[in-house]
Amino acid sequence: MNWTVIKTLLSQSLFIFIMRKEVLRVARYIAKRVLQAIPLLLVISFIVFSLIHLAPYDVIDSVTTPNMSPDRVEALREKYGLNEPFFVQYATWLTNIFKGDFGYSLVSQRSIAGELAVRIPNTMKLIIPAYLTALILAITLGLIAAANKGKFFDKLIDGIASLGIAIPTFWFAMILIYFLGYRLNLFPIIGMNTVGKAGDFNDFLAHFIMPYLTLTVAFFPELTRYIRSSALQQVAEDYVTVQRAFHATKWQIFRRHISRNVLIPVVTQLGLALPMLVTGAIITETIFGWPGVGPYLTSATRSLDYPVIMAIMLLSATLVILGNLLSDVLYSVVDPRIRKGGKE
């Protein structure tokens, strides 16, 4: 065996050793963060459960009628366990959650897990395309604005972003419904599919356009300002001064260097956007009658259907924690200089 082969084998062995060490480090970090998240989730669930319990009325009040006898009302409370002490109700619910059982809606009597299994994909079909479109627009417009700081394009893009932030989502949705749905009759107003046309892509696309536009307009203004701010911070860095000293053009600096470094905070935003996959379109879905998580949560809130509210809030809180964890992990992946604890 010659020396070249030996060096190759040693290099491969060293690479495998380093990769295993890195994987173990990331795995330990993830396990540590997950263990830290468990008490936080318990605290969040307890707070939400307490607020629902302190409400002036509950789901039984919303389903009873004046003709019901007190014995019938009491029987309903006993059936749903609402006559039990607060901590007993909370412990029962928490025990079922640990078993993977979100329970049943007190109003519809349907499985909450089954409802969410249908509604979450519907929400994701709406959120993901809108957010990715908004992100692409934000990266493009944010870099253009930063490259033209104080000039016409910067002021124009900042004005568009300010207008987008100022416009309420529900108001913009109603404007689209009035002009595109009612006056011009271009798109259906309500739902995700026409009755009898489930699975028809063209029909789905027609229902999809207006809520998609609403969410895109809702997402991109703040993202655009975030990208612009990140790019302007990069402009002040020393490496930009060095590139200018070597007579690099502004567009070369932005294309080759600043745009790449701006992607680091963008990646972290992707992690922080994870909770939106469940609760990011509540208003839009409710207005357009989109069969996602939004109308389900809104209806449950009106009737104080606390098993549904608790399940969605716990799921949302879990995604917030996982999103922060994902952001930290992605941040260290896209920038190899970063190490947890500040160690190389």
Image (cartoon, helix red, strand yellow):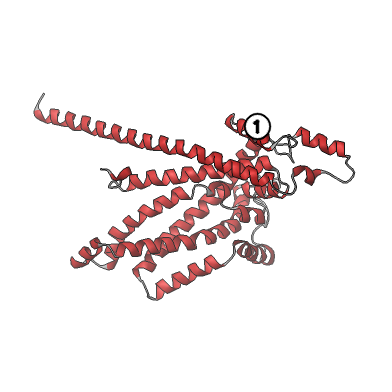
275 displayed left or right of 81: left
User: In front here: 225 or 49?
Assistant: 49
Residue highlighted by disc 1: 92
Expressed as whole percent of the image width and height from the top left, the position of residue 277 reads: 54, 47
User: In front here: 209 or 271?
Assistant: 271
For disc 1, the neighbor class at 10 Å (few under 14, some 14 to 19, many from 20) is few
Circle count: 1
The answer to whether any part of residue 21 appears in the image is yes
Looking at the rendered image, the quarter that the C terminus falls into is: top left
In the displayed structure, 149 sits above or below 70; it is: below
Expressed as whole percent of the image width and height from the top left, the position of residue 128 reads: 51, 50
Expressed as whole percent of the image width and height from the top left, the position of residue 247 reads: 20, 68
3 displayed left or right of 132: left
In the displayed structure, 333 sits above or below 87; it is: below
Point 43% across, 39% down: residue: 33
Q: Mark 1 is on which residue type? A: Thr
In the displayed structure, 241 sits above or below 52; it is: below
Expressed as whole percent of the image width and height from the top left, the position of residue 243 reads: 22, 63
The answer to whether any part of residue 119 appears in the image is no
